[in-house]
C-alpha cells in the first residue's frame, strides 16, 4: 500500500510539474480541490499510520488507520453530545487508558482494549471497525485524495516571498491576482534556529499555504504571529519525512500524509492530516476553510 502511495505521489508530481507552463502557473495555484477542506472539517486529527500519545487533548474527532495508543487523553470536548456521531475511529487495535471520549461513539479494530479508567461521557457505544459495513471513513480513498492534493501543492509556484533575519521568518504576500491563495515555499534549511514566523499581509481572509521541502526538521519554541489559523495550511512534501514539535504553538492546519511527527508539549490551533503521530499534544478544533 505504501509503495503504491509513493508511486502515486511521484507520478502526480511529475505530471503536474510537466504541465506547469508559465501561462498556467496561476491557474494551477488557484486550483485546489475541496476534499481536504471536507476532511479537515470531519476530523480534528486524521492519522494514516499509527498514533501513540500521552497527555493529549483533541477537541474534535480523531481517526487512525493503523494502531493507536492513548493515555491521559481527552477527545471531542468541542463536539457536544451526539450519540450518533463517531468521535473516535481506529482501523486496527486501540489501547486506551486514563482518558475520556466526549461527543459521540467509538469504532475500533479487533483485539482493542479500552481500560475501565476511560470515561465514555456521551455514549458507551463501541463498534468493531469494518470499512464496508459501518464506515464513513474509507482510509484508502482518503489517502489517495490527500496524496494527490499534497502533490499538487508541493509543485505549485510560490506567489509570496520569505525573508529571514534574527531567528525570524517573515512571510510577505505578493500580488493577489485572481487567486485567493498565497503560496510560500521554504526548505528545512531555512527553518533551522527559527523560533518566530510572521505574516506581513493585512488580508486576514486570504488563504495561506506554506510548502515545506526537506526530509527532517525540528520546531523548538516556535511561535506564529499574524496568521489566521482557519486559513493557514502547512504542507510537508517529503515522502516519509520526520518532523519534531517541541513547545511549539502552531497557528495552522497541517497536511503531511506520509510524514512522521513527534510532539512534546505543543499546541496546534488547527487540524492534522499526517502519516504518524507520537508524543504529547493539544489540538484546538479550528476547521480549515478554503476561499
Image (tube, rainbow, N blue to C red):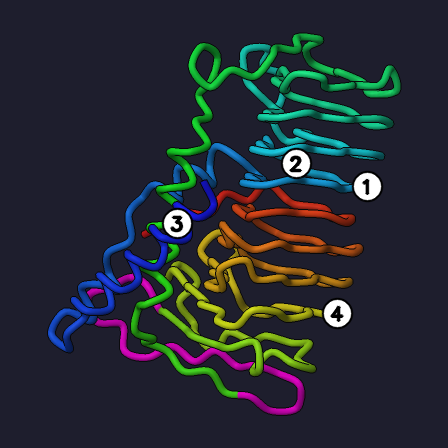
Label 4 – label 2 distance at C-alpha: 22 Å
Answer with mark 1 or mark 2, whichever residue precedes in sequence: 1
Question: Foreground mark, 1 or 3?
Answer: 3
Instruction: Report whether 11 appears left or right of 103.
Output: left
Answer with mark 3 or mark 2, whichever residue precedes in sequence: 2
Label 3 – label 4 distance at C-alpha: 29 Å
Tell me, for residue 221, which label it has, or none: 4
Tell me, for residue 7, which label it has, or none: none
Question: Foreground mark, 3 or 4?
Answer: 3
Tell me, for residue 54, which label it has, or none: 1
Question: Foreground mark, 1 or 2?
Answer: 1
**Mark 4–mark 2 CB contact (< 8 Å):** no
User: Residue 227 in the image: x percent, y percent?
Assistant: 52, 65
Which residue is the extreme one toward the bottom?
Answer: 165
Tell me, for residue 147, which label it has, or none: 3
User: Residue 26 in the image: x percent, y percent?
Assistant: 20, 69
Location of the N terminus by quadrant is top left
User: Residue 231 in the image: x percent, y percent?
Assistant: 44, 55
Q: The magenta stretch spans which residues?
A: 164-182
Reading the image, the residue beneath label 2 is 59
Answer with mark 4 or mark 1, whichever residue precedes in sequence: 1
Name the residue nearer the viewer: 43 or 287.
43
Answer with mark 1 or mark 3, whichever residue precedes in sequence: 1
Amino acid at each position: 500500500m505504501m509503495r503504491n502511495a509513493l508511486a502515486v505521489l511521484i507520478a502526480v508530481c511529475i505530471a503536474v510539474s510537466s504541465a506547469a507552463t508559465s501561462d498556467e502557473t496561476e491557474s494551477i495555484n488557484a486550483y485546489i480541490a475541496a476534499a481536504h477542506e471536507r476532511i479537515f472539517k470531519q476530523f480534528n486529527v486524521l492519522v494514516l499510520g499509527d498514533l501513540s500519545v500521552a497527555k493529549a487533548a483533541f477537541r474534535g474527532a480523531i481517526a487512525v488507520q493503523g494502531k493507536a495508543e492513548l493515555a491521559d487523553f481527552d477527545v471531542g470536548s468541542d463536539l457536544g453530545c451526539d450519540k450518533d456521531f463517531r468521535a473516535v475511529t481506529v482501523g486496527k487495535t486501540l489501547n486506551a487508558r486514563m482518558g475520556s471520549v466526549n461527543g459521540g461513539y467509538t469504532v475500533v479494530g479487533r483485539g482493542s482494549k479500552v481500560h475501565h479508567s476511560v470515561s465514555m461521557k456521551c455514549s458507551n457505544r463501541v463498534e468493531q471497525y469494518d470499512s464496508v459495513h459501518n464506515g464513513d471513513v474509507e482510509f484508502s480513498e482518503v489517502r489517495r485524495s490527500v496524496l494527490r492534493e499534497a502533490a499538487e501543492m508541493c509543485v505549485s509556484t510560490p506567489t509570496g516571498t520569505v525573508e529571514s533575519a534574527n531567528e525570524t521568518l517573515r512571510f510577505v504576500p505578493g500580488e493577489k491576482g485572481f487567486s485567493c491563495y498565497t503560496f510560500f515555499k521554504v526548505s528545512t534549511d531555512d527553518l533551522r534556529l527559527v523560533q518566530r514566523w510572521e505574516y506581513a499581509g493585512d488580508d486576514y481572509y486570504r488563504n495561506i499555504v506554506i510548502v515545506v521541502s526537506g526530509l527532517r526538521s525540528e520546531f523548538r519554541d516556535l511561535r506564529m504571529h499574524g496568521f489566521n489559523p482557519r486559513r493557514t495550511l502547512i504542507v510537508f512534501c517529503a515522502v516519509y519525512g520526520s518532523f519534531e514539535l517541541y513547545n511549539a504553538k502552531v497557528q495552522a492546519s497541517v497536511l503531511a500524509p506520509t510524514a512522521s511527527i513527534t510532539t512534546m508539549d505543543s499546541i496546534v490551533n488547527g487540524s492534522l492530516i499526517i502519516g504518524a503521530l507520537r508524543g504529547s499534544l493539544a489540538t484546538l478544533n479550528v476547521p480549515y476553510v478554503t476561499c
